[in-house]
Image: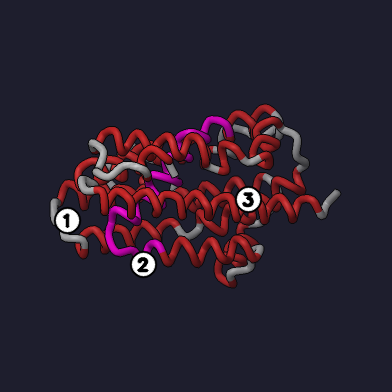
């Protein structure tokens, strides 16, 4: 956490606080700084290692509809009844399910789940295997704990701000920052086509939209020091989960050597 913020006695201006959160993600997110991801982006991993990573990444992405639906519920329970704000959470759910299924949607694309399953097939993981793992919670222990952690955040957070800090401000913003890295790496180093890796391109675009609602709500509602401390701690929880997942994947990949 920012030492300057934690040492302050009063709330910082909302826009400045949002910049602080963004910098925390830029400076601390595993997908930007963990050596494993640097190896992915540089094309230094074999396909067996990529398949291990993809399987565990699926363990997180496969929960997105449930997690985002919980946010819509928590939005109302937090006293936010503005239909324009609620619609933004509905839009997120629509993009996860698949814009192609809804009239008037921004883009006629498949849902994120379907796009990831396509990516899995192209790298040699049958969709049936990924669906089975999701259904049976058959992942590495660190990924299982992460799934429990994300669901706990989604279902038991005291407020919508803690939810969006740990997810939209952390995960979706990091997707915005890394979508292009994944796309270029898989195309240039691993021989995949644009269609194979559409998940990463679409995730980069959609999660720019998804992260925006998180920062909009934080700027609007995180106006006291007490709330800002809770939001920053929630963001830290999200960042910590990603490092734990990635450490688990890296250890599993080491067994191949």
Q: Dot 3: what SS?
A: helix
Residue 202 shows up from this direction: no
Q: Is 191 located above or below residue 230 in the figure?
A: above
Q: Position of residue 240 (x, y in %)?
A: 52, 52
Q: Quadrant of residue 153?
A: bottom left
Compared across the picture, whether 183 is left or right of 109 comes to: right
Q: Under tag 2, what secondary structure?
A: helix
Question: Residue 205 in the image: x percent, y percent?
Answer: 41, 35
**Which residue in the protein does label 1 denote?**
80
Q: Position of residue 230 (x, y in %)?
A: 33, 54
Query: Which contiguous range is marked in magenta?
Result: 153-181
The answer to which of marks 2 and 3 sits earlier in the sequence is 2
Disc 1 on helix, strand or loop? loop
Name the residue that disc number 3 marks.
Answer: 246
Q: Are marks 2 and 1 in contact (CB under 8 Å)?
A: no
The answer for how far apart the CA atoms under marks 2 and 3 are is: 24 Å
Give the alpha-carbon distance from disc 3 to disc 1, as whole Å.
35 Å
Give the labeled residue for mark 2: 155
Mark 3 surroundings: few (<14), some (14-19) or many (≥20) residues within 10 A: many
Q: Residue at x 23, y 36 (%)?
A: 13
Q: Quarter of the image holding residue 194? A: top right
Q: Residues within 10 Å of mark 2 (few under 14, many from 20)?
A: some
Q: Is residue 31 left or right of residue 229?
A: right
Q: Is residue 195 magenta?
A: no
Please identify the residue farthest to the left as the structure is shown: 82
């Amino acid at each position: 956490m920012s030492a300057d913020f934690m040492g302050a006695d009063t709330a910082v201006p909302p826009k400045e606080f949002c910049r602080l959160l963004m910098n925390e993600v830029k400076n601390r997110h595993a997908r930007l700084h963990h050596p494993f991801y640097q190896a992915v982006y540089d094309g230094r991993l074999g396909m067996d290692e990529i398949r291990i990573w993809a399987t565990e990444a699926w363990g997180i992405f496969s929960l997105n509809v449930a997690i985002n639906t919980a946010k819509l519920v928590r939005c109302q329970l937090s006293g936010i009844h503005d239909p324009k704000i609620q619609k933004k959470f509905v839009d997120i759910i629509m993009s996860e399910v698949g814009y192609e299924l809804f009239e008037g949607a921004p883009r006629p694309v498949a849902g994120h789940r379907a796009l990831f399953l396509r990516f899995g097939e192209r790298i040699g993981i049958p969709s049936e295997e990924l669906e089975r793992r999701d259904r049976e919670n058959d992942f590495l222990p660190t990924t299982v704990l992460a799934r429990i952690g994300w669901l706990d955040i989604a279902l038991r957070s005291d407020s919508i701000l803690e939810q969006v800090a740990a997810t939209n401000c952390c995960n979706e913003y990091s997707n915005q920052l890394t979508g292009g890295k994944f796309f270029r790496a898989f195309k240039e180093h691993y021989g995949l086509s644009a269609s194979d890796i559409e998940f990463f391109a679409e995730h980069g675009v959609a999660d720019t939209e998804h992260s925006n609602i998180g920062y909009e709500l934080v700027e609007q509602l995180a106006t006291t020091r007490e709330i800002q401390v809770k939001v920053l701690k929630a963001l830290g929880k999200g960042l910590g989960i990603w490092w734990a997942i990635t450490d688990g994947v890296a250890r599993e990949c080491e067994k191949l050597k």
